Image (cartoon, rainbow, N blue to C red):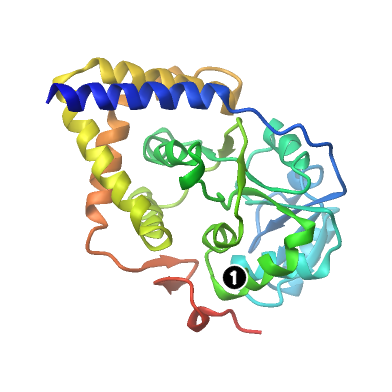
Amino acid sequence: MLPLIAAIAIYDFIHLLTEIRIRPGRLAPCRSVVVMATRGVKGWGRYRDFVDYVVVDDRRTAEEAEAAGLRALLNKYGGKSGALATALEELEAELYIFVDDDAVPGPWLDLLRRSCGRFATAYRWVLDRFQNAFSLGGFDWMVWKKTRFMYGGAMAIPGHRRREVAEALKVCPVDDMAVTAVAEDIEVLPYLVPMEPADGAWEFFIRQATAAKIGNAALWAMELVYYGLWTAAAVLFPPLFLLQAARTALRSRRALGRVDWVQVLLSPIERPLQFAVFLATIPRRCFRWRGRIVCGCSRQSRLPS
């Protein structure tokens, strides 16, 4: 068991150093457009200085957004992926920045604006400590080049790839899965995006883990095994919990500008919770996403025109 404990400790320490060394690219800003897909929100005014366009499903919602000073587009295809495909087809820009309607503005948006010519993404910091304890696991695999993926809550799309991305979004109803399939190289930003919590914590956990399983089965299997081995090793070697706490402290400073000590105190439950969630998704082949059942991205799941 000692070799396993040593291997996990070394792996986590290298991971910590890798996160510390993440730096944004040195690309200059270009003509960008910030787009938010939404079915409707409360308090439209708070997005006035945050996004350039909102993509909505109906004329009434568009009128509400425009009355608050926002520019609105009508979704031509339905669903979030359809909304983003609509923006790519209707708007001209050198860089398209897509943000979720539950994202909190911050320095991460300025970094995304500097990602001209490349795909870029920033990961989430959920403003619910229990949900965040599970969600932070996803960032582990984004810092490694071979397991990077586009997080749909905040991502940048280079203008010269917009048609290819639009077609992928029309095929796949899950936006981050669609864009990841197109992007060869993804820049991971050093900041985390504060996000409002999702409804139904356990359902949220299962959906995210199942989506990982469908999108990249090898990555899902790696996470399942790693979280299980980490939990067993930490029971025998508790200092691993301290290393995990240090990583959580670093991430909170990047997300909030300060250390969230309550989240740090909760860090010992992160790996066991992640293992339990991934274990629960072993028999699952599909998940519910925005009112539809998703079992993969294929021509059969193409959005209606």
- Residue 268 position (above or below residue 151): above
Q: Name the residue rendered at 57%, 61% in the picture.
A: 175
Residue depicted at x 32% and y 45%: 223
Relative image position of residue 139 (x, y in whole percent): 47, 38
The residue at the point 53 percent across, 21 percent down is: 20
Residue in the foreground of this view, choosing between 29 and 72: 29
Crowd tier of the residue under label 1, counting other residues whose Cα lies within 10 Å: few below 14, some 14–19, many 20 or above: many
> Who's the residue at 46% across and 46% down the image?
147
On screen, residue 282 above or below 266: below
- The residue that disc 1 covers is 79
- Give SS at disc 1: helix
Q: Is residue 28 left or right of residue 12?
A: right
Quadrant in the rendering for residue 264: top left
- Identify the image quadrant of residue 91: bottom right
Q: Position of residue 11 (x, y in %)?
A: 34, 27
State which quarter of the image contains the N terminus: top left
Residue placed most toward the observer, 25 or 246: 25
Dividing the image into 4 quarters, which one contains the C terminus?
bottom right
Q: Position of residue 216 (x, y in %)?
A: 40, 58
Question: Viewed as shown, does residue 105 lie left or right of 251?
Answer: right
